[in-house]
Image: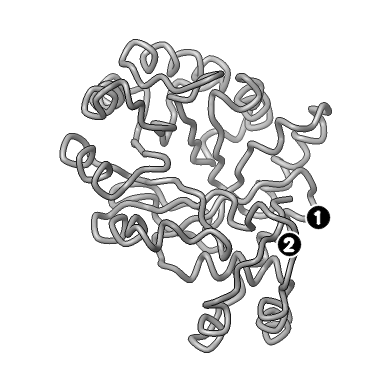
């Protein structure tokens, strides 16, 4: 598995990670554990969860599945989204990290995101609370989710932003249009796309199929390869509950798109479902 660096001072991780949200949708813990172990077998070292996924169950699943492998992986979690809203208050953040560490069975989170900016709390207060967790040794690096370049810059002036996570795919290109991906590149932060295969139903995929055929790849692999091609600092975290889909996703790291491929995909954007 190829690797990419998670921020200017962060660890090198697998070029794609595993987004664990979808594992909350299965009632069979053995299925979730099998997917996580298969990810390890395929060289994935970057795992993404959040305290709100499954109301904490997702972190528990991940913590149990990674027992005995914790030193091999980079673990990301998030705080700030709560049932019914957003809470970026320092008090909530201080409580949330301890609960996450307990569920994950770890004494430190490698990358901790502010899941959403709380409009009722100044970003500087939320980010300052997160920075204090680094000082206390509970967190190694900090990230933001779904922010503007201006918000990222405000936080970065207080404490380095190691990663920004946003929805991004061939069918959802807002981070390119707003400049978030470029901000990350210019400031030594990783950009971590979630839902890199889109959210809609499959529709009008001929350009993607044509590109995939040129590389003897699947449309899914070509779609993830397009995301990877947006910069060496881009580390997508596709999610799945199927080991066979996981293998397909991992193979995307071996697809090197050409300038002609990227031109052909420039207007592609109908929708493909996250699996």
| Quarter of the picture holding the N terminus | bottom right
Quarter of the image holding residue 170? bottom right
Image x and y of residue 37, in percent: 71, 41
Position in image of residue 42 (x %, y %): 68, 54
Label 2, on which residue? 248
Query: Mark 2 and mark 1 in contact (Cβ < 8 Å)?
Result: yes
User: Foreground: 247 or 55?
Assistant: 55
Which residue is rendered at x = 61% and y = 72% of the image? 254
Callout 1: helix, strand or loop? Answer: helix
Residue at 52 percent across and 80 percent down: it is: 262
Q: Crowdedness of circle 2 by 10 Å Cα count: few (<14), some, many (20+)? A: some
Q: Quadrant of residue 127?
A: top left
Of residues 128 and 271, the one drawn nearer to the viewer in this rendering: 271
Q: Residue at x 70, y 60 (%)?
A: 272
* Residue behind mark 1: 244
Q: Nearer the viewer, residue 27 or 246?
A: 27
Query: Residue 24 shows which numbered tag?
Result: none
Q: What sort of colour scheme is used for the picture?
A: one colour
**Depth check, front residue: 203 or 78:** 203
Above or below for 157 versus 29: below
For residue 78, above or below residue 184? above
Relative to 199, 51 lies left or right: left
Residue 234: percent from the left, percent from the top? 44, 59
| Label 1, label 2: how far apart the Cα atoms are | 7 Å
Q: Secondary structure at mark 2?
A: helix
Q: Residues within 10 Å of mark 1 (few under 14, many from 20)?
A: few
């Amino acid at each position: 598995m190829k690797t990419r660096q998670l921020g200017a001072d962060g660890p090198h991780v697998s070029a794609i990670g595993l987004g664990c949200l979808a594992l909350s949708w299965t009632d069979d813990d053995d299925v979730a554990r099998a997917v996580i172990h298969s990810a390890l077998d395929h060289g994935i070292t970057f795992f993404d969860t959040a305290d709100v996924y499954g109301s904490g169950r997702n972190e528990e699943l991940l913590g149990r599945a990674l027992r005995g492998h914790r030193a091999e992986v980079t673990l990301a979690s998030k705080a700030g989204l709560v049932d019914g809203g957003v809470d970026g208050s320092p008090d909530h953040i201080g409580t949330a990290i301890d609960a996450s560490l307990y569920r994950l069975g770890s004494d430190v989170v490698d990358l901790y995101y502010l899941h959403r900016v709380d409009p009722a709390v100044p970003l500087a207060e939320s980010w300052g609370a997160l920075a204090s967790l680094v000082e206390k040794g509970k967190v190694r690096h900090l990230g933001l989710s779904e922010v503007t370049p201006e918000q990222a810059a405000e936080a970065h002036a207080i404490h380095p932003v190691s990663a920004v996570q946003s929805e991004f795919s061939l069918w959802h290109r807002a981070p390119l249009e707003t400049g978030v991906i470029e901000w990350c590149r210019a400031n030594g932060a990783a950009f971590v796309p979630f839902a890199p295969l889109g959210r809609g139903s499959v529709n009008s995929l001929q350009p993607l199929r044509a590109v995939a055929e040129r590389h003897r790849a699947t449309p899914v692999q070509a779609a993830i390869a397009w995301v990877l091609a947006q910069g060496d600092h881009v580390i997508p975290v596709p999610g799945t509950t199927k080991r066979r889909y996981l293998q397909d996703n991992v193979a995307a790291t071996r697809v090197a798109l050409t300038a002609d491929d990227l031109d052909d995909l420039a207007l592609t954007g109908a929708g493909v479902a996250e699996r």
